[in-house]
Image (cartoon, helix red, strand yellow):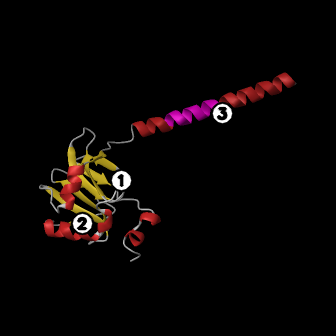
Amino acid sequence: MIGKTSFIFINRDRLFISLATILALFLLAGCATGGNYGKLERNRDLDNMFLRYEVLPDHRYYSTGGFDAPDAILAVHTDYELDNSGNLWRGVPNVDSGQMRIWIDTIAPEQNYRAGGYFAAYILDPNGKRVGAWYSIEPQTTVKFLEGNKIQVWTPHLSPDIGRGIRRGGR
């Protein structure tokens, strides 16, 4: 009887391990082939362009959060179209250095020159080509490339401790 009981437990353990292995492989395969994703590439020269209120030519601008004090500024090259199906980004037509000045001077100016403040990054497609720019206090986002030169960029996920109220003196 003891021999049969051991055999049942061994088979149950093998079944559990086999199922866990298959599930893990399935999840890993899903992550590896889960889409056409880009990435952000931090760039100090781009930081300085934003701080000099310069506008990237041939780019459409978007903001999220407050219009005058956005959580992020997004610039997408005109060769691409932003997939904004959730209406989380607000298109800002005719952005010029005046609008850039409003944004940069009002989004926590004390953060602009300190480590951990707002920063700029180029948005790269899966092949490493620059297709836009990101300026935010959040150091990462998800960038997904869809068919027809459409791009999906997630808005920043600000936690309460770095949210606008604390950053801007409780307003």
Question: Extreme left residue here?
Answer: 57
- Residue at the spot of label 3: 16
Residue pictured at 24% horizontal, 66% vertical:
104
Magenta residue span: 16-26
Q: Which of pointers 3 and 1 indicates the residue nearer the eye? A: 1
Nearest the camera: 109 or 82? 109
**Residue 83 visible to an observer of this rendering:** no
The quadrant of the image that shows the N terminus is top right
Distance of mark 2 from mark 1, alpha carbons? 17 Å
Q: Amino acid at mark 2?
A: Ile
Nearest the camera: 20 or 48? 48
Nearest to N terminus: mark 2 or mark 3: 3
Nearest to N terminus: mark 2 or mark 1: 2
Magenta region's main secondary structure?
helix
Q: Residues within 10 Å of mark 3 (few under 14, many from 20)?
A: few
Is 68 one of the magenta-colored residues? no
Residue pictured at 66% horizontal, 30% vertical:
15
Residue 54's spot in the image, x, y percent?
A: 15, 60
- Residue at the spot of label 2: 104
Q: Residues within 10 Å of mark 1 (few under 14, many from 20)?
A: some
- Residue at the spot of label 1: 139
Residue pictured at 47% horizontal, 36% vertical:
28
Label 2 element class:
helix
On screen, 124 above or below 66?
above
